[in-house]
Image (tube, rainbow, N blue to C red):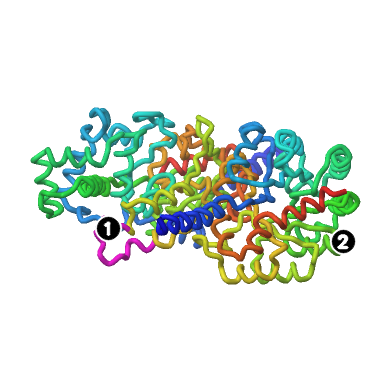
Amino acid sequence: MKYGIISVVLLAICWTGFSSAEELPLVDTHIHYSHDAWEMLPPEKAVGLLRKAGLKYAFVSSSSDDGTQMLYDAAPNLVIPVLRPYRKRGELSSWLYDESVPQMLERRLEKYKYAGIGEFHVFGDDTNLPVMRKVIQLAHDYGIFLHAHSDSKAVENIFKIQPQARVLWAHSGFEQPTEIRRMLSTYENLMADLAFRNEHAVNGEIDPQWQALFMEFPDRITVGTDTYTPERWFYVEDHANWSREWLMTLPDQVRENIAYRNAERLKDWGLSK
Amino acid sequence: MKFVRQCLLFFLVMVCGAQDVSADVTFNKAEKIVISRFGPWPPVSQADVSNKASGNPEAIELGEQLFGDRRFSKGNKLSCKDCHQPEFSFADSVSLNRGFAPLKRNTLSLYNLRWSNWFGWSGASDSLWMQSLRPIISPDEMNMTVAKVGEIIKNDRSLNEEFERIFGDAGNLNGELLYVQFGKILAAYQETLISPRSRFDQFRDALLAGDKRAIDLYPEDAKRGLKIFLGKGRCHFCHFGPLFTTGEFADIGMSQFNADGSVDKGRYTGIQTLLASPYNLLGKYNDDLTGTVGVRTRHIRLLHRNFGEFKIPSLRNVSNTSPYMHNGSLKTLEDVVAHYSELDIERIHQDTEALLRPLGLSDEEKQDLVSFLKTL
């Protein structure tokens, strides 16, 4: 009987450990639901894929923003709307020169609630172009963050233009830990997402350089998939499971921060106004 | 006035003459170096040390026989040869074939596989013998079981004896080992399937030898196409070497949706399948006791970019292997060239795949590129 109780307790401990890895809540901060995605995946099906991945929230931005609104209508307790400055796919490198973009953003910001503006692509000194300056101003006026797919130079320029800006650095700029550390140390309002990054973890083990970065900035990192094609929606679950695997090797507090708390705090800040 | 007319005529002759001269396509030193690396054909080949039957004449002969043997499918319905038809370069000429169910990937040609490292569109096999096993037990293809394959071999005295002669085992082998040996014999035969020397090979050799007469036999439009292949098209970055392929995988912006709405994850699933299989080169069925051939498999890492990547196919004999792409969705070489010319760049993550961009080819350039491909 005694051994039976011990076995049950051990089994329960093992089960708890296993289930916590499986059920670790995640916020995916890098989801797109663009027009070709909603043509292939109606909102109910797309939401189903997010729920299947066990996501607590998904930061969604789309080309056009109609996709985000459709998804938000389908799952307001799951979708965190982020306003993308692209009306359709294909505007990735032309939007900065389209002076009608700020007006379009303003109209959407007046009509709907957003936590941020992005994900947009801007590099180097293009940040100083009038359209980008207006976008930075709009984010400041509405008290929401900027989701920037940018190099370090562009991020630095954003903070030069508006030191109070909050920036979620898409893909951590595809930079290495040394540079990410420099940027996070320099700009306290900068957070970094790990979307489409592999280097930090192999087979569930975190690279020591990245581990040091995560330990140094446990409240500044988020995870994300980047569904840049409709097909990538079917990768959200794989990505979530892959993320859980390496996240489980981190100390509890750090793990929870990177998995969902950092993103939740950013969401709460963005939606609080 | 007459003088003016004569001048005009002289000018026209000069212009036309100049065009004729410029139409003579020549290749600079750098281009010749790349062209030289497209050969010689066929390359030197060695036996597959992971397969004891590799290069064994008896295994090759038996493999050819088994390749057309329908007993190794459920209900004696199909053989390998039914999808890999010799008259279609050991492919099948349809977009998507069906075995016991509709298939989701285009049938690849079996030519020149002896020089590959990964097999199938997703590289789910790391040896030709492992790849030969896959369709046998796939429910959608030949729909057999490992045990049934073993039973057929055990119950066929002549076949059993041939297996024993080739592998030197006693006759009490278990079904799984016989199944693996079956794959190895099929592989021994497929290693002998080598595409013939092409018009391009003759041109390449002539170019390197400076044989002007033989060089002139190669069509001018194909030469112009080769120029595009090496230059504006940048095709040779992925399609290089004697096989015209790196042998690796890439996402070239093709749809990954299957007809039923599911998604083909390509190399991502391929790596997972390969690493989980008992038949990979890290397993006990690898005949290479040194462990050398398994090194590549040991170092595979599953990456985000692998999702939606498919095998970069060899371009040898490509005009005989239509339709194209992993899902057979492009019917002709013209369609393939048009795909690259008008590539939707936003379907490809530029931070990891910076090589691809829309080529923006003119109609004439597209036709020249196709003409070149048809000579391979």
Q: Is residue A27 visible?
A: yes
Q: Mark on residue B47? A: none
Is B103 rendered above or below residue A212?
A: above
Q: Is residue B359 visible?
A: no
For residue A166, which quarter of the picture? Answer: bottom right
Span shown in magenta: B283-296
Is A153 rendered above or below residue A266?
A: below
**The residue tagged with tag 1: helix, strand or loop?**
loop
Drawn side of residue B360 relative to residue A104, left or right? left
* Residue B210 location (% of width, % of height): 40, 58
Residue A195 vs residue B23, the one in the foreground? A195
Drawn side of residue B129 relative to residue B242, left or right? left
Give amino acid for label 1: Lys
* Residue B24 location (% of width, % of height): 51, 48
Residue at 44%, 51% in the rendered image:
B271
Q: How crowded is mark 1: few (under 14 residues within 10 Å), some or many (20 or more)?
A: few
For the residues beneath circles 2 and 1, the answer to whether they share a chain is: no
Q: How crowded is mark 2: few (under 14 residues within 10 Å), some or many (20 or more)?
A: some
Drawn side of residue A246 relative to residue A173, left or right? left
Residue B14 vs residue B313, the one in the foreground? B313
* Residue A216 location (% of width, % of height): 68, 71
Q: How many numbered badges does the structure rendering display?
A: 2
Mark 1 sits on what residue? Answer: B284
Q: Mark on residue A164? A: 2
Q: Quadrant of the N terminus of chain A?
A: bottom left
* Residue B151 location (% of width, % of height): 17, 39
